[in-house]
Image: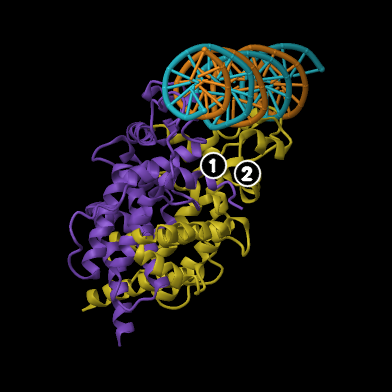
Chain colours: A yellow, B purple, C cyan, D orange
Amino acid sequence: MGGKHAEVVRLLWGPHPKPARGPRPTLDLDRIARAGIEIADSEGLADVSMQRVAAQLGVTKMALYRYVPGKAELVALMVDTAIGPYPAAKAPRGGWREQLEEWARQLLTVFRQHSWALDATVGPRIMGPGELSWLERAVSALDGTGLSGAERMDAAVLLVGHVRGISQQARAAGPAGNPEAQLGAILGDLMQSHGERFPALTAAFASAAQSDGQDQAWDFGLQRILDGLATFIDQRAR
Amino acid sequence: MGGKHAEVVRLLWGPHPKPARGPRPTLDLDRIARAGIEIADSEGLADVSMQRVAAQLGVTKMALYRYVPGKAELVALMVDTAIGPYPAAKAPRGGWREQLEEWARQLLTVFRQHSWALDATVGPRIMGPGELSWLERAVSALDGTGLSGAERMDAAVLLVGHVRGISQQARAAGPAGNPEAQLGAILGDLMQSHGERFPALTAAFASAAQSDGQDQAWDFGLQRILDGLATFIDQRAR
DNA sequence: GAAAAACTGTGTCCAATGGACACTGATAAT
DNA sequence: ATTATCAGTGTCCATTGGACACAGTTTTTC
């Protein structure tokens, strides 16, 4: 029972009994997570090492191991802290479609701010309370649509997939004029010099170069998904 | 010009001039890539190290550096080799919808066989000829639908996002009865013990537990996307 | 108050990683 | 036969995640 996941569960979900005896801890999980996030935000996830985070906090790397079982757990903590709980400032407004649209936009914002979170959320993993609260919000937006529980979760997964996909290519485009922008140019050159193998792609790329790019792809995909959901909900209602 | 991407471009796209003088190379790029893929398939991407791949091939790790500039480039090569060119065995059948459906299913198959490819394809990167041929196929399936070049690429990105999302959670479920299956159970427990914070999610999860799971989510998302595209294409046609 | 228990942060050590570089041989053009 | 070129090996290094023993601090218990 309680495999190796037990540690990350306790880290993300508590409880965190504070010690009775002994010296006062210099750090706490939140400070550690934020230190890691700061590094990841500016330098990328690859530069997040125990030593680097420890240095940022003014302690030795081994001090971190008093709070965090290992690096994997540190990253999991960083992810849930960075994503945070869903910002339910005001009560949800509008129907399911408006709610999901707003939800997706906010999720995209988070992934744009912490693009390293993409790398840290590949593969199966334990989700923290923050991440789950986002899922909760999406599923509850579909209450009363006639969709089953499984279908509501499937819809949420579908939206997350799109947000992730766009975040990924948004990172390539990046803030206008950044060094990574050449990636698109390189791919364009590659396609053209092997044009005979990729006729449709070359044509599409040329036509796409004139449009706005990333924002277009985001809205396009989002609206297609919502349209598809609307169709399904309508059918189900009849 | 030609930043640090130049090396991976030459590796993936050639040319690969074979040396005139000197001893015959023991290895070639394809063998190296396949050795890495074999390890990644069975042990995971984390176990792919230069030494491990070299050992598999019966050479020293430094010998690999004669063929590959570094580990990043090795992985890029592995990805494009594993994904391979789109298997265009027979001419495309059916309308755009049938073609895209078939395409998406095949892509999902590939990601299921090489689930590590998910980890290796996060973030912006140079795509190889294999990966591009898949994109070509998806875009060309939408020829004659009235969609612009940008829209056709957006549609492809949308589908890829869904495939990746499903592959990710399919890895968690894994082949029936594997050790990772407990992940879902753990999350279920977590949700229930914090049920008051996730009412909609708890309900949805309970209802979802009775349905089939991963295959359901795959078909659901795929059909919603295709429905959404159909709606758009119809509107555009009028 | 004194002693013991519990806990924190430090310093040292280790295996494995990606990579640099000099070197020994093998091969083909001259 | 000589020489330029290239392949694979062996050695070395910085950095990584992590184990572990130790010194110092604080609280509880006597």
Nearer the observer, A10 or B44? B44
Residue A87 drawn above or below residue B186: below
Q: Would you name the residue on which mark 1 appears? A: A75
**A75 horizontally vs A139: left or right:** right
Return the x and y of residue A111 as percentages of the image width and height: 53, 58
Dot 2: what SS?
helix
Q: In which quadrant is the C terminus of chain B drawn?
A: bottom left
Residue A47 picture location, percent across and down: 62, 41
Percent coordinates x, y for residue A233 in the rendering? 28, 74
Q: In the rendered picture of this protein, how many numbered marks are placed on residues?
A: 2
Left or right, residue A24 beside residue B43: right
Q: Residue at x 19, y 54 (%)?
A: B89
* Residue identified by numbered label 2: A36
Amino acid type, callout 1: Val
Give the answer, above or below, for where B170 lies relative to C13.
below
Relative to residue A121, is residue B232 depicted above or below? below
Give the x, y percent position of residue B25: 41, 27
The reply to whether dot 1 and dot 2 touch (C-beta < 8 Å) is yes
Disc 1 to disc 2, C-alpha distance = 8 Å
Residue name at image x 35 percent, y 50 percent: B130
Q: Is residue A227 left or right of residue A59?
A: left
Mark number for residue B54? none
Task: Read off the chain for label 2.
Answer: A
